[in-house]
Amino acid sequence: MIDTVLYYLVPTLLVLGTVVFMEWFAAWSHEHIMHGWGWGWHKSHHEPHDEALEENDLYAVIFGIFAVFLFWVGATIFWPVWWIAIGISIYGILYFFFHDGLVHQRWPFKYIPRKGYLKRVYQAHRLHHAVEGRDGCVSFGFVYAEPVDKLVKKLHGNKNGFDQSALKDDDQRPAAH
Ligand SMILES: [Zn+2]
Ligand SMILES: [Zn+2]
């Protein structure tokens, strides 16, 4: 009995723990690396453009390669790592769904959330893009988002101001800005 519980419990905790950790790590690295010394690649994501791909996508490629490496470690050296790699992959799918899909419409259909949690995540990331340049931005996470009025309050304290149109539900906005 206890064997069966552990057999399922350990992988479940590893996967869930990794997904939660990844949201923290993604928000932290977005704020301190992408908007810091890593701005060179991330800048492409904060500027309007017509190309399908951005230099910023290289970050996703690096995470992908790292996950593949962890799958290999898990399969050959130390099995728990395999479940960590699963957690990172699930986070990658969540990131794609919320960030690339919902907010930036990099999928072939249009869906704009009008209420609840999805709307909050959507608006929070649009507010992330409402400030020009790398400094003074808010909301660096992708799955968790602070309440929108809190973010707006922070943005009002921003000396460079912010683009108020990010709060509108307009579906005319450019796909990648
Ligand atoms: Zn950013
Ligand atoms: Zn974005």
Image (spheres, rainbow, N blue to C red):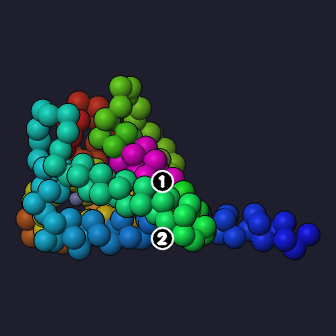
Is the residue under label 2 in contact with that under label 1 (CB below 8 Å)?
A: no
- Nearer to us of marks 1 and 2 is 1
Magenta region: 88-99
The front one of 164 and 130 is 130
The front one of 175 and 21 is 21
In the picture as drawn, the residue positioned furthest to the top comes out as 108
In the picture as drawn, the residue positioned furthest to the right comes out as 1
The tag earlier along the polypeptide, 1 or 2, is 2
Q: In percent of the image, x 23 and y 52: which residue is there? A: 58
Q: Main secondary structure of the magenta part?
A: helix
User: Where's residue 173, x and y in %?
Assistant: 21, 35
Q: Quadrant of ligand 1?
A: bottom left
Label ID, residue 21 = 2
Q: Secondary structure at mark 1?
A: helix
The front one of 177 and 148 is 177
Residue 51 falls in which quadrant of the image?
top left
User: Where's residue 86, x and y in %?
Assistant: 54, 57
Residue 26 falls in which quadrant of the image?
bottom left
User: Where's residue 135, x and y in %?
Assistant: 13, 68
User: Where's residue 53, x and y in %?
Assistant: 20, 39
Vertical relation: 122 (above or below) 3:
above
In the picture as drawn, the residue positioned furthest to the front comes out as 76
- Asked if residue 112 lies left or right of residue 3, the reply is left
Q: Residues within 10 Å of mark 1 (few under 14, many from 20)?
A: some
| Residue type, numbered disc 1 | Ser
Q: Label 1, on which residue? A: 89
